[in-house]
Every structure is written in C-alpha cells, then in structure tokens.
Amino acid sequence: MDKNCLPTDINNIIITTPMGECNIPIDKTQIKGFIKEVLKDAEENTSLFESEIIDFLDLESMADIDGEYEWWEENETPAKLHDLMDYIDKDYEIIHSRAYGRRQLRYTSISYKQFEFPNGSKNLPIKATFFIKDKNGCKFVIDINPVDGLSMEFQVMCDPNISSENDFTDGFEKYFNTKGVLKNAKFDAELSFLKYDKTGWDGIVLTESQRKMLDRNIIKYSSNLQLYEEKGLPTSRGCLITGPPGTGKTLCCNILMSQMNCTFIYVTSDTIQNRGQIGKMYDLARSLSPTVIVIEDIDTLGAIDRTKSGDHPLLGEFLNCLAGVEKNNGVITIATTNFPKHLDRALVDRPGRFDLRLDFGLPDKELRETIFKKYLEGIKDRSKFDFNKLATLTEGMTGAHLKEIVMIAYTHALEDANYDKKTKVSYKGLLSASQTLISNREKHQYQMSKEPKVSTMHL
C-alpha cells in the first residue's frame, strides 16, 4: 500500500456504503508497522523448495546458487531419464528425493511413468528433485519437471564456491553419448526404439558377389575400425543400395540390424522434417560409434537432382554430413533408393559419401527358381513341382511378387480345405496364383498408361 493512500485523519477512516458512511477508528502508526512487516516477509520469505536447496547447499540465498537449465524435447526424454537415473546411481549418493506442489510450498508425490526400452520396461520419475553428492562430497540438486507433455525442464544447481554445474552435466552428457541406453541400440531419428523381426541371411536370397560386398564393406569393416584407424585409413563408409521395390533392400538392412552388434539409426522421411536434424543425428552417431545409419528411400529426403528439381533445404546438410569438415569416424551410412538416376550427382558420384553401390535388380530366371524353392522348402513333395515353369511364368517379377504368389496359393488352399492345419500348397495352386498376379499387374500397367500426363504450369 502506498503511504499516500493512508487516511489524513489519524483517528478515523471513512468508508461509503449503500447504507451511508461508516467511520472506522484507526491507528496510523500501527498500519505503517503492519505494512513494513508484510513487505519484509515478502522479501525474505522463500518457498519450501528454495529453502531446502539453500539449506542443503549451505548457502545464504538462491542468488548465491550456480545453476543451469536444459530443455529436453519429448522424444529425448525417455532415453535421457533412463541414463540420468543410471548415472546418478553409478556415481552419486541420493541424500533426499522430493517433489513439490505447484507453488513449491508443500511436498507432493514424485510422479513416475513407465517407459519401454530394449532391455525391458522401467518406471522412471518425471517430476522430482534429487539432492545428491559425489564421492568427494560435492553436492548437487537435480530438478526435473514436465513442461509440455513429456518435454522436460532439467536443472542442475550447486555451490559455485565448491563446484560447477558442468561437473555434473559434462559427465552426464558423456555417459549419455557413449555408455547409455542408446549405445548398440536400434532406434529411429526420433530416438524411438525399433521393433523388428530378428532374422539371418537365410531369410534373403543374394548372389555370392552381393553377400561378399556387404560382408567386406559393412560387417567386417565395422568390426575392424581400429585396424583401419591404425593404418591411417578412413573409418567411415557409405553404401548405396538401389533397385525396384520388392527386391530386398529393406530386408537386407533389417538382417544387418539383426546380425551386427553396434548402434543402428534408422531414418525415413517421417522422422526427418527440419533442418538441423540430420546434423544432430550424425553427431549422435559419431559419439555412439560404431554406428550404422540406414537412410530409407534417400530420394524422399531431399537428395534429388538439383538440375531438375532445384535446391532442396536438406540436400546441403546431407552433403556436409556425409563428407564435410566433421569426420564421420566410426559411422557407416547405408542409403536405399528405388530411383538412383534421380539422385544428385554430388551425392552419388563422390568417394567419401557413397563409396559402394549395390544394385538389387530383378532376379533372373535361375534366381527366381531359387527363391521359389526357398519359400516352399517346408513342402515335402515339392520335387514334383516344375520350378522351371514357375520361374518362366514370373519373368520380370521381384522376390516380393514371388512371396505373394506363395501366399495367395496357401490362402486359397486353406479356404478350400476349410482351414485344416495340415493343408499344404499345391503346384496347381501356385500356377493359379501366378496367373492371378500376372493379371493384376497387367491391369495396373494398363491403368497407369491411361492416366493423363501431369503438366506443370508456371504462373
């Protein structure tokens, strides 16, 4: 209250009401004293949260505290919470753990949320304050607080006369980037862990040459990075896998993911939307190396030919990340595309970006026979099948088409046998399924030929 608002009459204050004026006796000296006490309390009074931090760090006020804020994006929160708790348990002693109400004047319950990780589910705190000290007795207060959904505000506080907040944050960041839950894990560009079918090389039909190239340039290369480094050779590699849809590009990447014990980051156009994401992803890949980055359908991520489409905001970032100032030590990049001719020349015709090109073309007749035999290896009387005829009928088809033929034949056989578990695929059924797929493809090709050509108008 401003002192000028005090009544001039030292004995009374007059209040006008609907019933008339009301005279209230006052003591001006008492009012001034009361106002001083209120202002003093307002200046000196601290919340329970603040007072406990001050007491724990043995300081006079919050102004004496050294602190640092970080913002965790929602996609980062699960992995960072996981590693934060592991890091604290490993190197620190928790003296107190608290949670405070909205105004920080009272205690409330610590909030937890269950997250799924490759090593199982964990119930982790999402709103809590930890009072901790390290082996040397240095004290820190760690506060985590949800701000928007699972986006988190992460704060470290300490006594600047004894330690720095960097003593905690630098160690935690190093742990997160090199030893945390992301190390040797399989996840996408949004740090979501991948659920995939683990399979071996018997799940795909490759030529001997293709298998050797993958083994030499990816599998054995990744496991011998130290040897390459000792010889002064690059420890990064790029492999471009091309071919029509259904020829096994994605399956090949999934098998590599299943077979290799290293970090995998799987990138699609759904998980990369903005500038800076690619650079951040490669920074993480380097710290978690050896790392394999798989870029699915790289042409959909802006790597298209500039001479035909103009500059794309992500192309420059790709070029710089693949062979820029920052060396991708320990990082292997695998990119797939259905349209290699559409890719920018600076991306595909430059050693150090993509050193190897592996073409997954349409399988020839001999390979189609092999694929059919593989899909039908559980059929005991398959020796009666004319695989030569099946391979001849399916000229121009991919492995995915052949798999669909077997699926159609089995589905029809089950239906005819009233879904008897002992039902098996027949040769007659395979021929019929082949004709069905041939007919469907012809209809699709006819419809595509009848679609009007799209023209571009410049206004």
Image (cartoon, grey):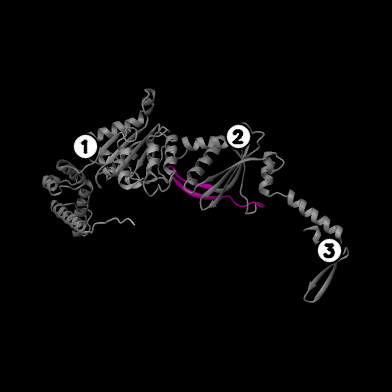
Q: Is residue 150 left or right of residue 393?
A: right
Report how far apart the C-alphas of labels 3 and 1 lie in the structure.
Answer: 99 Å
Numbered range of the magenta stretch: 104-125
Task: Tell me which amino acid carries mark 1.
Answer: Thr
Report how far apart the C-alphas of labels 2 and 1 lie in the structure.
Answer: 57 Å
Q: Is residue 293 left or right of residue 78?
A: left
The residue identified by callout 3 is 7
Residue lying farthest to the right in this orientation: 11
Residue 259 location in percent, x, y?
33, 37
Residue 125 location in percent, x, y?
54, 47
Circle 2/circle 1 CB separation < 8 Å: no
Q: Find numbered disc 1 in the image and state the secondary structure of the residue it sits on.
A: loop
The residue identified by callout 2 is 134
Q: Find numbered disc 2 in the image and state the secondary structure of the residue it sits on.
A: loop
Task: Tell me which amino acid carries mark 2.
Answer: Asp
Whether residue 235 appears in this view of the structure is: yes
Badge 1 density bin: few <14, some 14–19, many ≥20, Cα 10 Å: few
Q: Earlier in the sequence, mark 3 or mark 1?
A: 3
Report how far apart the C-alphas of labels 2 and 3 lie in the structure.
Answer: 59 Å
Mark drawn on residue 281? none
The residue identified by callout 1 is 207
Residue 302 location in percent, x, y?
35, 46
Q: Is residue 338 left or right of residue 231?
A: left
Task: Tell me which amino acid carries mark 3.
Answer: Pro
Residue lying farthest to the top in this orientation: 231
Residue 42 location in percent, x, y?
74, 52
Instruction: Answer with the quarter of the image where residue 346 lies.
Output: top left
Q: Is residue 47 above or below residue 334?
A: below
Badge 3 density bin: few <14, some 14–19, many ≥20, Cα 10 Å: few
